[in-house]
Amino acid sequence: MIRVKDISQKNDRTLSILWTDNKVQNLDVVKLRLKCPCAGCIDEWTHKPILKPEQIPESVRPVSIESVGSYAMKIAFNDGHSTGIYTYQMLRSLN
Amino acid sequence: MSIFESVMEKFKGAPKSVAVSEQQINAALSVIIDPDLNKDIVSLGFVRNIEITGTSVSLEINLTTPACPVKETFREKAEKALLEIPGIEKAVIEMTATTRSTKPDTDTRAPALRGVKNIIAVASGKGGVGKSTTAVNLAFALRQTGAKVGLLDADVYGPSIPKMIKIDTKASVAEGNIIVPPESDGIKLISVGMFNDGDKAAILRGPMAAGLIKQFLTQVAWGDLDYLIIDYPPGTGDIQLTLSQTAPITGAVIVTTPQEVSLLDVRKAISMFKTLKVPVLGVIETMSYFICDGCDKKHYLFNQGGGERLVREFGVPLLAGIPVDPMVSKGGDEGKPHVRDYPDSITAKSYKEAAGAVAQQIAILSSNDDGGLSSFSLTWKN
């Protein structure tokens, strides 16, 4: 079971995660906002994206990032969107 | 080479009158292997406070859980090994335990849960399998070993714990809207049933129920606990999700009966915990068999080996099989936990076996600590 060993802000728009298998992942926070998996951004049944990329400004940034249980994290963004629960599994699949 | 020979080897030529050293004690005890952690008890740091006075030695063996099932075996082995050291005639061994937490200290958990070392979810795929009875008896069995135990009845729609356990003290509210849980035999208890009339149904929408559960986890003065047992509502829904999202659950125990239909739902429960990344500690099979008053033979009422099939399918251990025992449900109806009132019955012994196995699985988990954070929070800087 892979979990987060350390999590930090690398620079203005990069989130850095050190996983328990010692893999380091650097994630672009704007891309994370675009990939939001919540039901408002991705249709629950068809899995088709509802969120239009042009709605998201390049200036979007997280406000806070918090763990959810032992399987995911919740990211609150400065555009007021905070319903996305990013599972570790999903994050690991991002490049 | 036997323990005796190996010790003798080290002492070849040494006169008997020379005082025994601490190293010799450690060497003698290092042959005792913890079967779960696959290491000897000396390198695990279990052996403490060695004191040698002439020909007698006293020491402490500090285990990872007071519910350790091999406690007595360790004591016997240690005593034997010590008495085989030339020059030792008396060995006094004190067995103690410090439950290790699977959680690092630097966490952002709700303050109410910070003193809680391990949180155990007791869940089932469907209702009526004896989940609450199991949760209650597990709590009492762990308590009997000396552990500090709390029990949270999260079955908002059908709270049964207040009926199953007679409460000694009343719940009260302390400063800052913190609920002080009532206790029974030193076990801290919280249940929805304490806050409404026993006969009235709790009619709550999902979000209300979820809010209530969140409060039970974050606004109850749980204090220092070795184990907080959460009696999950049956099924795989809203509340199960809230529970697993609010608190870092150490592991889940799945309760099932041996029938195939029950196993079907267990698969769902196991898959839910897998999704939520909560390790499944194992399965407890209730209504496993029946022992009649005429003989000691185990009569299997349902299919035999359902639990074992699960073990094969999912690779989770079968923690124990609990027999059908009318005394257990009678005790439940009268607010008398079976394990407490009939500690020597076959059923009580099977619950104790289950509790020992749960503690053992948790000890294994915490020894495999991979440095993962149980919780974190990060504020973005612009």
Image: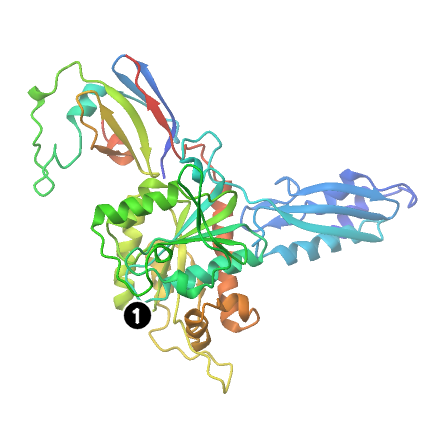
Q: Secondary structure at mark 1?
A: loop
Q: Report in which chain the residue with disc 1 lies.
A: B
Locate residue B255 relative to residue B79 in the image: left or right.
left
Q: Is residue B49 visible?
A: yes
Which of B21 and B250 lies nearest the eye of the viewer? B250
Dot 1 corresponds to which residue?
B259
Q: Say above or below: A50 vs B221.
A: above
Locate residue B317 relative to residue B68 in the image: left or right.
left
Which of B283 and B7 lies nearest the eye of the viewer? B283
Image spot of residue B98 (x, y percent): 59, 44
Q: Say above or below: A77 vs A59.
A: below
Q: Is residue B1 visible?
A: no
Looking at the rendering, which quadrant does residue A77 occupy? top left
Locate residue B138 relative to residue B18 in the image: left or right.
left
Name the image quarter holding the C terminus of chain B: top left
Q: Say above or below: B233 vs B103.
A: below
Locate residue A71 relative to residue B63 in the image: left or right.
left
Image spot of residue B27 (x, y percent): 73, 42
Image spot of residue A11 (x, y percent): 30, 12
Marker count (numbered): 1
